[in-house]
Amino acid sequence: MDINTAKEALLKRSNAFQERYFTAYGQLVLRVNEETYISSRENLRLSKLTEKDFDLFDINTGDIGRIFSSRDDINAIVFICTEAAVRFSKENQIMRPALDDLAQIIGPDVTVCPDGTARTLLKALRNRRGCFIQGSGIIAVGDTIEEAIAGARILEKSAEAEIYSGKLNGLQYLDPTTAQELHKYYDGSYSKVNQKEKVDFISSGAEEFQLRNRIIDCGKDMSRSELVQGSWGNISLRLNPDTMLITPSGMDYFSIRTEDIVRMNIHDLKYGMQRKPSSDYRLHAALYRRYPECNAIIHTHSNGISAFAAAHAGFRISEPPMDQLIGDMHCSEYRTPGTDELCDSIMEAIEGSHACIIANHGAIFYGNDLDVTLAIANAVESRACNLLGFGQRAEEEDA
């Protein structure tokens, strides 16, 4: 990788901080090669970065260089300073997972470091992909800048849930054994799926080709709207009465190609020699089987709804016309992600509605059209944020 390619990658991914929920100041860092790394200057507003905001450093320079020199599995580092992250890091010494994506991606617990020296951070990042720095914010690491940014956003989302948990009678934390098992599963299996660079294109008609591309466009819109982080969440469309198209497992929405979308039978769940489908394929198929009017499904991990999910709490949508479609947003019972038990729990919670909250996880929405379902997901997320009293700070700062 040369410096221009690295700079382009950082600028491209800085758009992940769209400021729907918070204004993030900080630093994006990427290893260029064995001898150098590129970094944005400290404490800049990440959504406003330009080409002039980056400098090249020797790999041995500063605490960042020492982290790169000590960990060859770390190629990207993200520092973010937000209101919730700073507040949480001032008041706590450790974060327990109340969201299963935190347990899976970051670790079964997260340390609040007393300082930002390389020695302290390397200790906190042992078998972890992120931590807090007391009074400063978040550091997240990854093999790629996409992984590091996703980790930073998950840590920020978890800090938001902690800060606003008082309005929801507290959070329902995962037990330590479950958190450890989730992290082990992610490291051992989930993070390694669909690593084959390309798959063969499956012959399809014009309608299927169009639907595949609609799913891809929807995934990018979900990411830009901050309804998901990294590869989390999923999307599907009904192709015909017996078949659905669903996003692949573990792939970033901006890297998915037309041939990566998985065609699956909703009855026997067979999908042939394709990408591995999203781990929630059982749930999608069950919804299509039960509800003939269901033609589109979206699963999100957005900040506002995640706070309710972490508290096992629901809320009511009373504003028309959403009240007719959604009504009560019930929360399912917690079950292990990707299992038949989770599917059964969600099918019970979604009865009589077009959406529900998934305990310690996120939310699921279905409808007769993909664009309408995405609009519903955005509207419900805005309602959740308004009920909690966050999500408007970035707009207020720009006013």
Image (cartoon, rainbow, N blue to C red):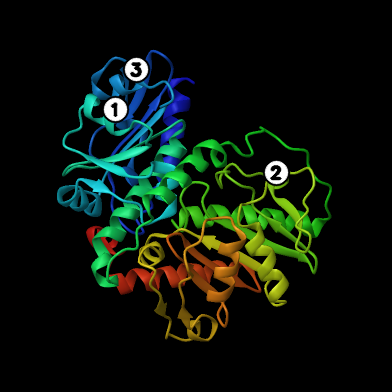
Dot 2 falls on a residue whose secondary structure is loop
Amino acid type, callout 1:
Leu
Disc marking residue 122? 1
Residue 268 lies in quadrant: bottom right
- Label 3 Cα neighbours within 10 Å, binned few <14 / some 14-19 / many ≥20: some
**Nearer the camera: disc 1 or disc 2:** 1
Q: Earlier in the sequence, mark 3 or mark 1?
A: 3
Tell me: 373 left or right of 238: left
Dot 3 falls on a residue whose secondary structure is helix
Tell me: 92 left or right of 316: left
Amino acid type, callout 3:
Ser
Amino acid type, callout 2:
Arg
Dot 1 falls on a residue whose secondary structure is helix
Question: Distance from label 3 to label 1 (Cα)?
Answer: 11 Å
On the image, the x and y values in percent for residue 190 come to 56, 42
On the image, the x and y values in percent for residue 49 come to 33, 40
Query: Which residue is tagged 2?
Result: 275
On the image, the x and y values in percent for residue 325 come to 54, 82
Query: Which residue is tagged 3?
Result: 69
- Residue at the far front: name it: 177
Disc marking residue 340? none
Q: Earlier in the sequence, mark 1 or mark 2?
A: 1
Q: Earlier in the sequence, mark 3 or mark 2?
A: 3
Q: Is residue 291 visible?
A: yes
| Numbered label tally | 3
Q: Is residue 399 visible?
A: no
- Label 1 Cα neighbours within 10 Å, binned few <14 / some 14-19 / many ≥20: some
Question: Distance from label 3 to label 2 (Cα)?
Answer: 35 Å
